[in-house]
Image (tube, grey):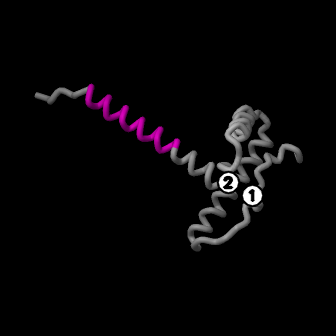
Amino acid sequence: MRKPRDFDSELKALADKAKQLKERRVRDLGALVTATGADALDADVLAGALLDAAANTDKAIGEGWRKRGAAFFQVKSRDTASGPRQQPESTIPLDSGAASA
Protein backbone atom coordinates (compact mmCIF):
# COMPACT_ATOMS: atom_id res chain seq x y z
CA MET A 1 0.00 0.00 0.00
CA ARG A 2 1.25 3.46 -0.92
CA LYS A 3 2.06 6.09 1.63
CA PRO A 4 -0.41 9.01 1.41
CA ARG A 5 1.01 12.33 0.23
CA ASP A 6 1.16 15.19 2.67
CA PHE A 7 -0.26 17.96 0.50
CA ASP A 8 -0.07 20.53 3.30
CA SER A 9 3.68 20.13 3.75
CA GLU A 10 4.22 20.12 -0.03
CA LEU A 11 2.24 23.37 -0.36
CA LYS A 12 4.19 24.91 2.51
CA ALA A 13 7.49 23.91 0.88
CA LEU A 14 6.38 25.44 -2.42
CA ALA A 15 5.27 28.64 -0.69
CA ASP A 16 8.63 28.85 1.11
CA LYS A 17 10.47 28.36 -2.18
CA ALA A 18 8.37 31.07 -3.86
CA LYS A 19 9.13 33.44 -0.98
CA GLN A 20 12.87 32.73 -1.30
CA LEU A 21 12.75 33.38 -5.05
CA LYS A 22 10.93 36.70 -4.53
CA GLU A 23 13.46 37.76 -1.88
CA ARG A 24 16.34 36.83 -4.18
CA ARG A 25 14.78 38.82 -7.02
CA VAL A 26 14.46 41.90 -4.80
CA ARG A 27 18.10 41.55 -3.70
CA ASP A 28 19.24 41.11 -7.31
CA LEU A 29 17.28 44.18 -8.44
CA GLY A 30 18.77 46.20 -5.60
CA ALA A 31 22.25 45.05 -6.59
CA LEU A 32 21.53 46.05 -10.19
CA VAL A 33 20.44 49.53 -9.13
CA THR A 34 23.65 49.89 -7.15
CA ALA A 35 25.88 48.46 -9.89
CA THR A 36 24.51 50.86 -12.49
CA GLY A 37 24.97 53.86 -10.23
CA ALA A 38 21.23 54.50 -10.21
CA ASP A 39 21.25 54.43 -6.41
CA ALA A 40 22.57 58.00 -6.63
CA LEU A 41 19.29 59.08 -8.23
CA ASP A 42 16.39 60.37 -6.19
CA ALA A 43 13.82 57.63 -5.62
CA ASP A 44 11.16 59.64 -7.50
CA VAL A 45 13.43 60.00 -10.54
CA LEU A 46 14.32 56.31 -10.53
CA ALA A 47 10.67 55.30 -10.17
CA GLY A 48 9.69 57.62 -13.04
CA ALA A 49 12.39 56.21 -15.29
CA LEU A 50 11.32 52.65 -14.52
CA LEU A 51 7.67 53.50 -15.14
CA ASP A 52 8.59 54.99 -18.52
CA ALA A 53 10.62 51.90 -19.37
CA ALA A 54 7.76 49.59 -18.34
CA ALA A 55 5.24 51.59 -20.39
CA ASN A 56 7.47 51.79 -23.46
CA THR A 57 5.87 50.29 -26.57
CA ASP A 58 8.51 51.43 -29.09
CA LYS A 59 10.44 48.30 -29.97
CA ALA A 60 13.40 50.28 -31.33
CA ILE A 61 13.89 52.09 -28.03
CA GLY A 62 13.47 48.84 -26.12
CA GLU A 63 16.02 47.13 -28.34
CA GLY A 64 18.48 49.96 -27.73
CA TRP A 65 18.02 49.57 -23.98
CA ARG A 66 18.49 45.81 -24.30
CA LYS A 67 21.76 46.24 -26.20
CA ARG A 68 23.08 48.75 -23.65
CA GLY A 69 22.12 46.40 -20.83
CA ALA A 70 23.84 43.45 -22.49
CA ALA A 71 26.96 45.56 -23.06
CA PHE A 72 26.87 46.64 -19.40
CA PHE A 73 26.83 43.04 -18.21
CA GLN A 74 29.61 42.06 -20.62
CA VAL A 75 31.80 44.89 -19.31
CA LYS A 76 30.98 43.92 -15.73
CA SER A 77 31.81 40.25 -16.32
CA ARG A 78 35.12 41.22 -17.95
CA ASP A 79 35.88 43.54 -15.04
CA THR A 80 35.32 40.83 -12.46
CA ALA A 81 37.22 38.24 -14.49
CA SER A 82 40.34 40.41 -14.78
CA GLY A 83 40.13 41.86 -11.29
CA PRO A 84 38.98 45.25 -10.09
CA ARG A 85 39.54 48.07 -12.52
CA GLN A 86 38.72 51.74 -12.17
CA GLN A 87 36.23 52.93 -14.75
CA PRO A 88 34.62 56.37 -14.79
CA GLU A 89 30.89 56.37 -14.12
CA SER A 90 30.33 58.53 -17.21
CA THR A 91 31.16 55.52 -19.39
CA ILE A 92 27.57 54.30 -19.14
CA PRO A 93 25.21 57.27 -19.62
CA LEU A 94 21.95 57.19 -17.72
CA ASP A 95 19.80 58.83 -20.43
CA SER A 96 17.53 56.54 -22.38
CA GLY A 97 18.72 57.58 -25.82
CA ALA A 98 15.14 58.57 -26.65
CA ALA A 99 16.29 62.04 -27.71
CA SER A 100 18.31 60.54 -30.54
CA ALA A 101 15.43 58.37 -31.75
Residue 37 occupies quadrant = bottom right
Dot 2 amino acid type: Gly
Judging depth in this view, the residue of 89 and 44 nearest the camera is: 44
Magenta span includes 20: yes
List the single residue furthest toward the left. Answer: 1
Q: Position of residue 74 (x, y in %)?
A: 64, 61
25 vs 40, nearest the viewer: 40
Q: Which kind of residue does numbered mark 1 sit on?
A: Ile
The question of residue 53 being in magenta is answered with no
The residue range painted magenta reads 8-26
**Residues under numbered marks 2 and 1 in contact, where contact means CB atoms less than 8 Å apart:** yes
Using the image, tell me which numbered label, if any, was put on residue 92.
Answer: 1
- Spatial separation of the CA atoms under disc 2 and disc 1: 9 Å
How would you rate the neighbour count of disc 2 (Cα within 10 Å): few for under 14, some for 14-19, many for 20 or more? some
- Seen at 69% across and 37% down, the residue is 47
Disc 1, SS: loop
Q: Main secondary structure of the magenta part?
A: helix
Residue appearing at x 60%, y 50% in the figure: 32
How crowded is the residue under tag 1: few (<14 C-alpha within 10 Å), some, or many (20+)?
some
Question: Percent x, y for residue 94?
Answer: 76, 51
Left or right, residue 39 beside residue 15: right
Q: Which mark is residue 37?
A: 2
